Amino acid sequence: MNIKMQKLLPITAAAMLFATMATGAVADEVVKIGHVAPLTGQIAHLGKDNENGARLAVEEINKKGLVIGGQKVTLQLDAQDDAADPRTATQVAQKLVDDKVVAVVGHLNSGTTIPASKIYSDAGIVQISPSATNPQYTLQGFKTTFRVVATDAQQGPALANYAAKELKLKKVAIVDDATAYGQGLANEFEKTAKSLGMTVLSHDATNDKAVDFRAILTKIKGEHPDAIMYGGMDATGGPFAKQAKQLGISAKILAGDGVCTDQLSTLAGDATDNVVCSEAGRSLEKMGAKGSEFEAKYQKRFGVPIQIYAPFTYDAVYIIVDAMKRANSTDPAKILAAMPSTNYNGVIGNVQFDEHGDLKHGVISLYDYKGGKKTLLSEVNM
């Protein structure tokens, strides 16, 4: 380097500093929001759907511009894969804490959301699950746990009530996948079914990796049920329904939101025509103009249809940002302090939380399938 260049460098640096001070230009504060869902494995399509909803919100907010406490803020989605595995979920949760996220949207499954919740609680970080329905998640005494869907304590009874009162079913066999979600939903369904006078013929357990259900289904066929309630996800629920039909079982297949996806028709074929399922939230078609607008934006951005809970992750990001605005801070502790007073009108409707972090006004939607297409039957306000 020549002497002239050496002399110029300090002057240039000083000039740049002066210019920055004169224009008031300050680098944006980068604020990380975590998102966790299974991005690999059998239900990766559901996890990616959730991530897409959160990503769409982050991109929109950044495009509009966000200022908190007089500082321009750029959001960054810290997206992680828990593979629907509880052990991986806790490792990923610790990674997000170490990454210094200010809040987390996730996890997708109850079986991952619940063990991860202690790590977020210990760190004082808001966790909003868009899809975990096991009641235990928000009943642990943590101040950090919130969700934007109804619970299985509402979903199970809604499904049982529909089976007993609308379908007039008398005898039911129950099978669950032994996860926190599948087992929890099946148990809630069973309690209500019995209280309504339905006969529960049997309650069997499988696992969330099973692909062959013929032994359980053959046993159940001999019990002659009017319906079989399956607690699990679509990756196993699809083959379950398909094999039931192959075995000549005419009983209705009842299931919760884990099964109740557009993907089910691919997994179960024409056996979907015998399925009645529930979702722990308002249907997209009942979300009105906001739902239609969201659907159009989502499909334009990602080129695929919505599975289930993308609108819920989208709103969860906006709810976190709403808390930031009300707190006028990106400090996780101040965001957490603002969360209980949330009163946000989003795509999924009005969101207010009770003392546990559950929705004050939950909705259960019930569906069947006509020609492989998921069709809304009714909506139950909780």
Image: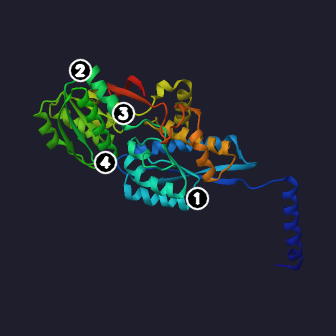
Instruction: Please name the residue that numbered disc 4 is placed on.
Output: 179
Q: CA distance from mark 1 to mark 4?
A: 30 Å
Q: Position of residue 3 (x, y in %)?
A: 88, 79
Q: Secondary structure at mark 1?
A: loop
Disc 2 to disc 1, how far (Cα)? 53 Å
Q: Which residue is mark 2?
A: 168
Coloured how? rainbow
Which numbered circle lies on residue 155?
3
Q: Is residue 322 above or below residue 284?
A: below
Instruction: Identify which amino acid the numbered label 1 is placed on.
Output: Lys
- At numbered mark 2, what does the secondary structure look like: helix, strand or loop? loop
Q: CA distance from mark 4 to mark 2?
A: 29 Å
Give the mark nearer the N terminus: 3 vs 4: 3
Local packing at callout 3 (Cα closer than 10 Å; few below 14, some 14-19, many 20+) is many
Which residue corresponds to mark 1?
100
SS class, disc 4: loop
* Residue under the image location 23 percent in, 47 percent down: 206
Amino acid residing under circle 3 = Gln
Q: Residue at x 64, y 42 (%)?
A: 61
Q: Secondary structure at mark 3?
A: helix
Residue placed at 50% from the left, 54% from the top? 121
> Furthest residue to the left?
222
Q: Amino acid at mark 2?
A: Lys
Give the camera-side residue of 299 and 258. Answer: 258
How far apart marks 1 and 3 lie (CA) works out to 35 Å
Circle 2/circle 1 CB separation < 8 Å:
no
Q: Earlier in the sequence, mark 3 or mark 2?
A: 3
Could you say which quadrant of the image residue 195 lies in?
Answer: top left
- Residue 37, how many percent across, how many down? 44, 49
